[in-house]
Image (spheres, helix red, strand yellow):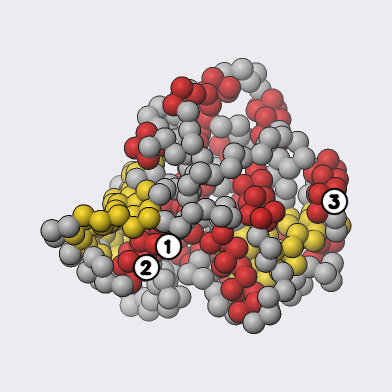
Amino acid sequence: MTSEPIRLGVVGLGRAFMLMLPTFRADQRIALVAAAAPREASRQAFENEFGGRAYETIEELCADPVVEAIYVATPHQIHRDHVIAAARAGKHVLVDKPLAISLEDGAAMVKACRHAGVHLIVGPSHSFDGPVVQARRLIDEGAIGGVRMINAWNFTDFLYRPRRPEELDTSQGGGVVFSQGVHQIDIVRLLAGGRGRRVTAMTGKWDARRPTEGAYSALMTFEGGAFAAFTYSGYAHFDSDEWMDWTGELGHRKDPAQYGGARHALATVASAQEEAALKTARTFGAGSEPPSPDHHEHFGPIVICGDRADLRLTPQGVHVYGDEERTFHSAAPVAVPRAEVADALFDAVRGDRPPAQTGAWGLASLEVCHAILQSAETGLPVDLRHQVSVTGEEGRDDRP
């Protein structure tokens, strides 16, 4: 396996790219060589910092012979077009979560990448977080016996951060299920082994001014008998970072005195256009960058119950509660933010070793997002048919 840096192109220089930017700057295994974005200011900022070329269109980026892999960091609803364009050009793909909005689009993306013989990785998602990977390793080593139950909670201000109109429209991938639920789904699937069987859920739409799902609770069963209960609220009241010693989602220290900041800022906005402008101000070349992490990223409290022990995940590591002894397994210090995502990309492109979070994995998580919405609408459980395990094995569907 060569150690030559991956020559990475990026399509989309918005918020998703901003959150990966510290990784790209710090990890010597990745070289940003090109980008595509509609805003001239962002393109110019990219060229000023990284050199290379910045294009207006994905087609121009895909035609660049220097680029060998592309990070798709564009809005959910155009992932299909951008991933398929990259695959047809023979480029490996890292696509931001969720894989797509519709299952049909997701399946087409997976098929296109398989046909082209390129890797498709779905991330970053919080299933890449160091303590999640650490917990999965402990499970694989038999530290807790069989996994029986997983509980996960997260309470944030997500719905009241600056949003474009489509981010408040569920049909266009808006709301917390597609943007946030996929994080929890990825985590619990990774920890439970991956292959889900059934979902029962309820959702909440409690603010007519933000007419999309702002909360959900779901119960998911898995092959082998494990189950997971997970809850999310983005309504900007209780903040579950209080349960994480005031470590924010991105791993930085959080000031509890800043409570209510998202709602306060939104109250000063007079129109959807003004709100969209605030969103644009968070893009590359236009706004401030995310704070440097003190610890690993997280997605709220998570407890895994096993036959012989329970695990509790924190940004600092994993607590193990055994039959007679409690221990703490410290996570490695954060040298490079989101290093696990860079590991996955490098291992796939240079070593042909894909992570769990392949295109098929992303399709399985997307199926759970739809199952949450469908169960909430019908009041009935939803059987899952597109699931894969953490080893990439696809389940055989014998159900009628």
Mark 2, residue position: 137
Distance from label 3 to label 1 (Cα)? 35 Å
**Badge 1 element:** helix
193 lies left or right of 67: left
Q: Which residue is found at the position 34% from the left and 58% from the top?
A: 329
Name the disc covering residue 336, or none: none
User: Which image quarter is the N terminus in?
Assistant: bottom right
User: Up-down: is 259 above or below 282?
Assistant: above
Residue hosting label 1: 133
- Residue labelled with disc 3: 47
- Which amino acid, by three-letter code, is at mark 2? Arg
Toward the bottom, the furthest residue is 1
Is the residue 45 above or below the residue 101 in the image? above
Q: Which SS class for mark 3?
A: helix
Q: Position of residue 316 (x, y in %)?
A: 40, 49
- Marks 2 and 1 close (CB-CB < 8 Å): yes
Whether residue 340 sits left or right of residue 188 in the image: it is right
Q: Which residue corresponds to the image point at 80% horizontal and 61% vertical from the top-left?
A: 33
